[in-house]
Image (cartoon, rainbow, N blue to C red):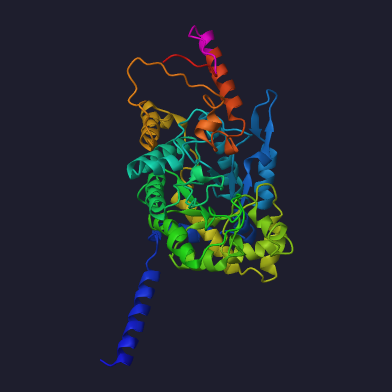
Amino acid sequence: MNRKSLFGSILLSSFLYATATMAQPAIAADAVLEGKIEAQMAKMSLKDKLGQMVELDLRGIMTTDAKGKFIIDQHKLDSLLVNFRVGSFLNTPGPTGVPAAEWGGYIEQLQRASIKHLGIPTVFGVDENHGVTYTTDGTLMPQNINVAATFNRDIARRAAEVTAYETRACSVPWTYSPTMDLSRDARWPRCWENFGEDCLVNAEMGKAMTLGFQGSDPNHIGQKNVAVSLKHFLGYGVPVTGKDRTPSIISIQDLKEKHFAPYKACVEAGALTIMVNSGSVNYVPMHANKEILTGWLKEGLNWDGMLITDWADVNNLFGREKVAANKKDALELAINAGIDMIMEPYDCSVVPLMEELVAEGRIPQSRIDDACRRILRLKYRLDLFDHPYQKLKDYPEFASAEHKAVSYQGALESIVLLKNEDVLPIAKGKKILVTGPNANSLRTLNGGWSYTWQGNGTDEILAKLAEDTANRKAKDGGPFIKPNTIYEA
């Protein structure tokens, strides 16, 4: 064979291999499920489809009753669903987490209203970054940096399984976790949230957690599982300044081989959704980066999952990055780049703005249909049409001793002994004083996402919870235990 023929054969083989690789979907399609999606799409107007692409903060429809308890304002909820066809909600009802029973009540109310007005269930999301971080009577897990320090895939998977079980017990079907950013700069303030600097460790732990959260069949998520949202795609953890949500400069080789690889591993394990980087990479805002969002991810991996923005990040395209003149232009950039759902916490104006963009031909109808299909696919995969909410009584292992043991084992295996100056092993019967401002601080010991965003105010919350519990025990004849007190073990 001459050189020209050989070169031609290599090119043909490469093309056939690439075509075969592209034809292999990251998640195998389910014909029955896809048929349901198409049947639902046929019933929907343009406004119905656009509303599905919007996610609002639950706090925007909350009020308080006579006792000061947070309750959903039914009139506001009905108005949002009727006028804007909103397809998703997120976050806590107030500044902190709430007990599981309260979660169930909120989600049931949301689902009943959504099904009544839209015929489509809402999909509710919460940041469950280390256990049920917004449920005050659930099980907290070690932070992901601790999970990585165990080098134990079973710990990662089991922690995610427990978290999924307790999250679904609260009727929440979707978590913005695990965090897949490579933390390669100690200045970055979210190093504790992911699995460290190594792409292989991130890939293996992320894969284990994806399977733990979702189970082994991404087309049929069980009632003890939840959908994941990998975050923050892509290159989020190495900002030039070290500050959160700011620009990164990364070589294309590093971006593909190191930062993209863990996401690829999780997508191939069945990850259903991904949240996008709030900043820019190599001077291109990720929310407007069609090459990476659509080219590398959706088309390159043949992935039929859903892309969601981070908190109000479409606004950054005109307010901070200055690549769009206004919100309408920013929506055009983001949606055409591949964004499917817009986390727009309090502003419903995105729906009429998107209507205008479609009418003007600036966003193709086909792109809207694609986004809506991906959102409906998530809802069908979660079985929300048949099981829109759950009952806490059907989850007897919620906050069980077995679940706490999983958390304890993860924490235990994550401890690394760097130096021992004749302190260990500790002699039996020896007393140890643990003192100082951080000795009994939930925020310091457990980190961010512990009942509040970044753990703000959690020490005060914990003290109040402990005092309330102690007072109830004292009233019932049990011992009174004061919070924030050191006791002899």
Quadrant of residue 102 within the rendered picture: top right
Q: Is residue 478 magenta?
A: yes
Which is more toward the observer, 431 or 266? 431
The magenta segment is 472-483
Does residue 311 appear to the left or right of 356 in the view shown? Answer: left
Q: Which quadrant is home to the C terminus?
A: top left
Does residue 23 appear to the left or right of 248 in the view shown? Answer: left
Compared to 348, does 16 lie above or below? below
Q: In the image, residue 437 lies at what x, y percent?
A: 57, 25
At x 40%, y 27%, the residue is 400
Which is more toward the observer, 442 or 91? 442
Which is more toward the observer, 78 or 297? 297
Q: In the image, residue 278 lies at what x, y percent?
A: 60, 54
Which is more toward the observer, 235 or 137? 235
In the rendered image, the residue lying farthest to the front is 421
Q: Is residue 141 magenta?
A: no
At x 38%, y 44%, the residue is 212
At x 47%, y 30%, the residue is 138
Q: In the image, residue 262 lies at what x, y percent?
A: 42, 56
Quadrant of residue 97 within the rendered picture: top right
In the rendered image, the residue lying farthest to the top is 477
Compared to 199, does 141 lie above or below? above
Q: Which quadrant is home to the N terminus?
A: bottom left
Taken as a whole, is the magenta stretch helix, strand or loop?
Answer: loop
Does residue 333 appear to the left or right of 267 in the view shown? Answer: right
In the rendered image, the residue lying farthest to the right is 325
**From this viewpoint, is residue 224 visible?**
no
**From this viewpoint, is residue 411 visible?**
yes
At x 34%, y 75%, the residue is 17
Q: In the image, residue 421 lies at what x, y percent?
A: 37, 29
Compared to 409, does 223 lie above or below? below
Does residue 207 appear to the left or right of 175 in the view shown? Answer: left
